[in-house]
């Protein structure tokens, strides 16, 4: 189906199913229960899951296939966001032209940076991309203030022209982002008993874009172009002596992944129309590297899993504080309760980075293939057990 | 009719004159061996032919066109394929994929953004790769990772990859280095078969005299960066200058 083989079609359908039913799947606990804080099914967080999923899918096309580790991909995310916000300021609040512009501008930006950075490979390439991203960040933060509005960040104002829209709504406020009139922020609440399921317009737009982006990445992975990118990673010497010019291949991969990042940036601005320089900082570039490696670089689903995993931790674990912990362990005797809370304290709230770091180390050491490898091992373990069960039941009668 | 003409080629690395005044003419459809003691400049000469090095002086003409200043991939697209001393293959890819890549390079040229169509829908490429695997006797290994092949199989795969590009000149850099006697003999048979059945010129750099005299119908002896003599195998065997410079007692 869709020009994919059976396995890839199944994978695509699973991803599509998970994203479409995410408002249910991420909201398993009733709103008034103590576990409600583990619910991730609210629009803001779900949008972030899929947007960073797109970012990581694109990054994986470069890093997973060619092995070129870019440490500056956040620059394209930022450029995408700025482009989108400018579109909201100048043209209209419709997200479609804004997203298209962010993809084009970040693609051009990636073409320039890629052309220069790809003169080197390995660690030198990583350093060059890092340097470019930090330069972009500094420019956005100070020198280019007329375009980026410096440290305040680019925001919408009431006197923006918006040629095809209105500068201000009838009641004098800034208009909201929409897709042909459908407001991104509009949310439908489905209340079933104690559960509150939220269906947000913006989330579903991002989800559809992510499914399309995921589908495109499967096609790229399975195409002759994708095979050439894996050849770049495997043996560039053989490639050059086989009549293939590896440079345009890597540059094309770089530009495609830059456009994915721009798409993510444009969507981010479409959900919340502001863009700040911190979106381009090296920590943001590092985050997408973590997502891809944690999920499984070079696998199709890995980056999406990694993105979801990290964003969940960032938003859920960072919200657990000492009061919550005392609530959980109140059944323990007083001294012991304080002690347990004291032990767990560094790993939660602001310390969530510590937990994430430990998990990342465990994954890299024990599961070099990321979460995907973990899933495969569990799958094989079950299969192996089933097989040995079948084997035993066969041999039993003979005894 | 010579397909490769090397004229007055010289190459210096710092204080070392690696090649000086090398003249070489490889006839079409011949098997031409280049032999010489260690440090004679065989590999430097080969690297000058494939674009890895640019000679300081002289000219290298392939089929009437100069190869100097062209990138390795351009020279390959002109019709020169190279087999390396240690097999250079795509270790992370399957054997079949390894074989498909040169077929794609032959069909689509040095770069083609063919990013949407599935690899499996490229019928012509698949058929060609499968046929070559069959010819190389590796069809049952098509789904193995190339890195897990044995040394001899890696060599066969690399030769097959080069052949599937239908090159006019095949350059081999010590193709049997580090091989057991049985593998060496298999490789000799394979190369004989290739030169008999295909419209191809082979230039081979080799240490192993057994291989050289089994295959070559023309031999150039290099010593200290310059050709000592170029002749037929029988005459090389009897040439006292060659014996003295290189063959010693083993010939």
Image: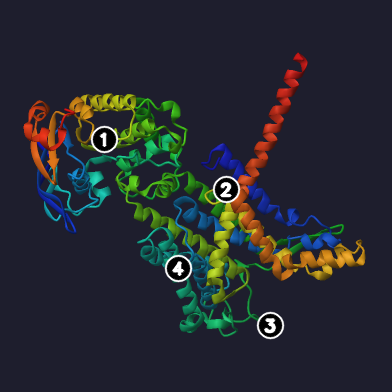
| Protein chain holding label 4 | A
Residue mark closest to the camera, 3 vs 4 = 4
Mark 3–mark 1 Cα distance, whole angstroms, equals 74 Å
Mark 3–mark 4 Cα distance, whole angstroms, equals 34 Å
Which residue in the structure is indicated by mark 4? A105
Give the residue drawn at x 44%, y 64%.
Answer: A107
| Protein chain holding label 3 | A
Residue A51 in picture, x, y percent from top left: 60, 61
Mark 2–mark 1 Cα distance, whole angstroms, equals 38 Å
Quadrant of the image occupied by residue A389: top right
Q: Are marks 2 and 4 on the same chain?
A: yes
Which residue in the structure is indicated by mark 3? A171
SS assignment at label 4: helix
Residue B182 in view (yes/no): yes
Q: Is residue A249 left or right of residue A273?
A: left
Residue mark closest to the camera, 4 vs 1 = 1
> Count of labels shown?
4
10 Å crowding of disc 1: few (<14), some (14-19), many (20+): some
Q: Which mark is residue A369?
A: 2
């Amino acid at each position: 189906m869709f020009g994919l083989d059976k396995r890839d079609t199944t994978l695509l359908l699973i991803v599509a199913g998970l994203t479409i039913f995410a408002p249910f799947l991420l909201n398993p606990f009733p709103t008034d229960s103590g576990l409600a804080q583990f619910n991730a099914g609210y629009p803001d967080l779900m949008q972030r899951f899929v947007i960073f999923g797109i970012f990581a899918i694109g990054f994986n096309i470069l890093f997973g296939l060619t092995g070129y580790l870019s440490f500056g991909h956040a620059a394209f995310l930022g450029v995408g966001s700025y482009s989108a916000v400018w579109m909201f300021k100048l043209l209209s609040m419709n997200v479609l032209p804004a997203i298209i512009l962010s993809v084009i501008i970040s693609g051009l930006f990636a073409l320039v940076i890629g052309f220069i950075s790809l003169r080197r490979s390995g660690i030198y390439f990583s350093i060059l991309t890092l340097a470019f991203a930090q330069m972009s960040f500094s420019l956005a933060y100070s020198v280019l203030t007329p375009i980026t509005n410096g440290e305040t960040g680019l925001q919408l104002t009431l006197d923006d022209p918006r040629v095809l829209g209105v500068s201000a709504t009838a009641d004098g406020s800034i208009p909201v982002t929409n897709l042909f009139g459908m407001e991104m922020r509009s949310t439908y609440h489905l209340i079933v008993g104690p559960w509150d399921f939220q269906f947000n317009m913006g989330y579903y737009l991002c989800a559809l874009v992510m499914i399309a982006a995921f589908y495109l990445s499967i096609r790229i992975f399975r195409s002759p172009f994708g095979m050439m990118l894996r050849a770049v990673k495997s043996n560039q010497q053989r490639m050059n002596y086989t009549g293939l010019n590896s440079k345009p291949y890597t540059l094309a991969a770089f530009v495609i992944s830059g456009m994915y990042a721009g798409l993510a940036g444009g969507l981010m601005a479409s959900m919340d129309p502001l863009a700040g320089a911190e979106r381009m900082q090296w920590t943001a570039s590092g985050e997408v590297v973590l997502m891809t490696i944690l999920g499984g670089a070079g696998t199709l689903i890995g980056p999406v899993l990694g993105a979801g995993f990290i964003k969940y931790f960032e938003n859920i674990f960072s919200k657990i504080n000492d009061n919550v912990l005392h609530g959980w362990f109140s059944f323990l005797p007083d001294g012991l309760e304080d002690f347990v809370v004291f032990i767990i304290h560094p790993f939660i709230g602001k310390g969530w980075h510590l937990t994430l770091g430990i998990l990342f180390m465990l994954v890299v050491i024990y599961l070099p293939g990321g979460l995907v490898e973990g899933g495969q091992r569990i799958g094989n373990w079950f299969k192996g057990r089933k097989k040995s069960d079948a084997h035993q039941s066969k041999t039993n009668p003979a005894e | 009719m010579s397909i490769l003409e090397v004229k007055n080629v010289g190459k210096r690395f710092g204080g070392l004159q690696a090649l000086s005044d090398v003249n070489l003419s490889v006839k079409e459809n011949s098997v031409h061996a280049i032999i010489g003691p260690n440090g004679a400049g065989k590999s430097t000469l080969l690297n000058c032919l494939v674009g890895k090095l640019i000679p300081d002086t002289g000219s290298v003409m392939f089929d009437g066109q100069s190869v100097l200043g062209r990138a390795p991939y351009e020279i390959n697209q002109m019709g020169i394929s190279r087999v390396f001393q240690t097999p250079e293959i795509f270790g992370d890819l399957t054997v079949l994929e390894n074989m498909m890549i040169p077929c794609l390079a032959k069909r689509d040229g040095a770069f083609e953004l063919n990013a949407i169509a599935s690899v499996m829908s490229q019928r012509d490429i698949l058929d060609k790769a499968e046929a070559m695997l069959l010819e190389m006797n590796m069809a049952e290994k098509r789904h193995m990772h190339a890195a897990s092949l044995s040394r001899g199989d890696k060599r066969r795969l690399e030769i097959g990859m080069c052949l599937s590009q239908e090159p006019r000149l095949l350059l081999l850099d010590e193709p049997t280095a580090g091989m057991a006697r049985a593998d060496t003999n298999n490789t000799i048979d394979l190369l004989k078969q290739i030169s008999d059945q295909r419209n191809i010129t082979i230039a081979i750099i080799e240490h192993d005299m057994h291989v050289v005299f089994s295959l070559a119908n023309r031999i150039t002896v290099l010593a200290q960066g310059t050709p000592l003599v170029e002749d037929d195998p029988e005459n090389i065997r009897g040439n006292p200058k060659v014996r003295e410079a290189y063959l010693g007692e083993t010939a």
